[in-house]
Amino acid sequence: MALLVVCALLCLSFWVSFYFILCNLNGSRSYEWNCRLVTLVHGILAVCITAYIGYVDGPWPFTHPGTKNTPLQISALVVSLGYFIFDMAWCVYFRTEGPVMLAHHTMSILGILLTLWLGESGIESCAVLFGSEITNPLLQARWFLKQTGHYGTLLGGIVDVLFVLLFVVMRIFVGGTMLYCELISPRPRFFIKCGGVAMYALSWVFMVDIVRFAIRKSKTWHKQQRGQQETVSANGHEGKKD
């Protein structure tokens, strides 16, 4: 356990150092810009590692929840633990996030700590981490497109559609299947199952916000389409008069 604490502190130091290096390199950018770069790097790294764990190293999380942690699973969780502690502290200090995101970070930290302390259920924790972070690059890309004035382009629309689809598939459908497998299995501890239910409930809270966003986006798109049709129609009538 002492070794895990040291590794977690080292990972935390790495993410903090990485952030300050980015701040020095991108002095003209905001603190949030550099923090989101850290978030983007962690998201890509976490997805790659946990995908390898789930699809190659094993075991399969849907059939073997509650099994003993492997060294690779522990490494992935410790790396993410250091990141979540850094990002949680950053969000609290700069007051950039609401209670829902802070609750997500808190549950992620507590869930990883519990998994490391028990020494089991690492595979489903990595699966949850994969499902949570796979939409992260798209979320950060959306923010960077807004900051650079390219959100209103076709690329911005594609990013939005992919984000919504990926969130629904991974966090709701795949996540729901994972939770079901977790709950019916006799191996995982009760507290782990409670954590799974809490994370899935939080996914539905995010889902409500995403549905509201999708409705607003759809209405805006339809208004733009009607405006363009009216403009074309008006130009056509003017041409006939001429």
Image: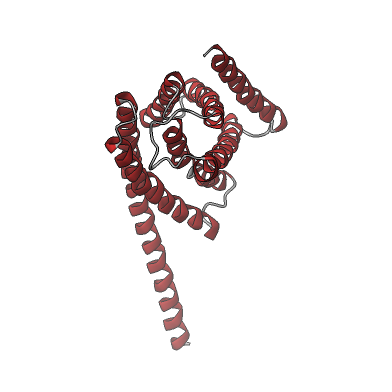
Residue at image x 54%, y 31%?
76
The colour scheme is secondary structure
Residue at image x 41%, y 54%?
165
Q: Nearer the viewer, residue 7 or 208?
A: 7
Residue at the left extreme? 184
**Depicted 72 relative to depicted 167: above or below:** above
Q: Nearer the viewer, residue 111 or 209?
A: 111
Residue at image x 59%, y 46%?
148
Where is residue 86? Give x, y as percent: 54, 23
Quarter-of-image position of residue 186 = top left
**Depicted 160 relative to depicted 22: above or below:** below
Quarter-of-image position of residue 4 = top right
Residue at image x 38%, y 42%?
63
In this picture, residue 153 sits left or right of residue 131: right
Where is residue 70? Give x, y as percent: 52, 30
Q: How many marks?
A: 0
Where is residue 193? Give x, y as percent: 31, 30
**Depicted 164 relative to depicted 10: above or below:** below
